[in-house]
Image: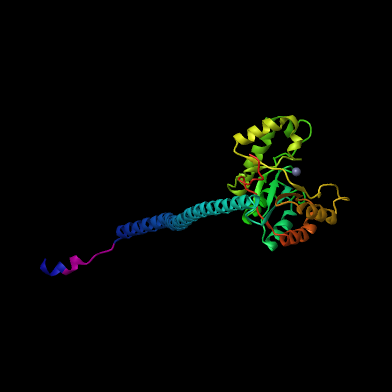
Amino acid sequence: MGENKGQNRTIRINDSVLVLLAIILVLILGAAVYIAPRYSKVFTAYFDQKEIYNTAAAELKAAQDENASLTQQLEEFKTLTTELETTRADVFKQAAQLEKDILDGKSDKKICYITIDDGPYKRGNDYLELFNKYDIKATFFLTTTNGDKLPDQADISARSMYPEYVRYGHTIGNHTYSHDYGSGGIYSSAKAFMKAVNKQQDFTKEATGGYTPEIVRFPGGTSMAGNQLGAIQDELRKAGLGWIDWTIDSGDSWGADKATPELIKKNVMDAAKDQKIMVVLFHEWSKNTVDSLPEIIEYLDKEGFIFLPLFKDSVMVSK
Ligand SMILES: [Zn+2]
């Protein structure tokens, strides 16, 4: 028995073992073939997901940073707006004092309030350029007769012009939304007038990001309001709004043939001779006005006029 021990330990591979091994091998291979692609899909999905989440996380972080930066910018903007309001109020306070000194004979300065009605037009840019060149400020009484389109350039939104007037320090006034003084129009009742005024206030605030006009110019002037004038003035006072006509009509709306640059210049220069604080009426659509303004400005400057934007506390503004 003892000497057969080694032989007994020899593994004898017989047929049944081979079959068993073959089955096991097939099972393992089968499992591998079956499972591997599934796991591979799982892994691919995992890595895809991970990439998506990483991208999302990065985007979220960027958005948060941007948000923080925007919040900061908004705060800075609010501060700037407050500073601007304070500065504007200071300038107007000094202007009011100057008006008083002029009227009291304590100053030999003179003031010219240039007012431009009926905009915005694309031509408004010519005025802005001109006023920048001479470093003077004016007042634009805006209306929205053509909807959110410029009357002289229909593919440009009227809205886009509004911030330009504010940017350069000019005053925006309210010339009513519809400018409709025909029968059944703004002068049919105080209610109709205020509706057109309020609509224009809203449009201006929205287009400028918060600028609120304080002065109204009646389309055609206060005389057009007829027997509604008193009721309209009461409503304007209630709304905290002032209103203004003009002391000089440049004549630029007297018809294309008549309103030549020569006539416009003559009208303004002649009338300016006996005025110390004057409000001159022009119209934004008039090319002849753009052409005549440089000479008018240079002449008035020599005559001692300074050009200011209108403000509600001005003696020229009724309230
Ligand atoms: Zn007008």
Frontmost residue, 49 versus 86: 86
Left or right: 11 as drawn, with respect to 283: left
The magenta region covers 6-13
Left or right: 235 as drawn, with respect to 296: left
Q: Quadrant of the C terminus?
A: top right
Residue 92 spot, x, y in % from top left: 59, 51
Residue 196 spot, x, y in % from top left: 68, 36
Residue 207 spot, x, y in % from top left: 63, 47
Residue 167 spot, x, y in % from top left: 62, 55
Residue 260 sits inside the magenta stretch: no
Residue at coordinates 78% horizontally, 61% vertically from top-left?
295
Residue at coordinates 70% horizontally, 46% vertically from top-left?
142
Residue most extreme to the right: 257
Quadrant in which residue 47 is drawn: bottom left
Frontmost residue, 266 versus 101: 101
Quadrant in which residue 111 is drawn: bottom right
Residue at coordinates 81% horizontally, 56% vertically from top-left?
265
Residue at coordinates 56% horizontally, 50% vertically from top-left?
89
Q: Is residue 60 above or below residue 228?
A: below
Q: Is residue 179 above or below residue 93?
A: above
Residue 290 seen: yes
Residue 288 seen: no
Residue 9 sits inside the magenta stretch: yes
Residue most extreme to the front: 105
Q: Quadrant of ligand 1?
A: top right
Left or right: 65 as drawn, with respect to 90: left
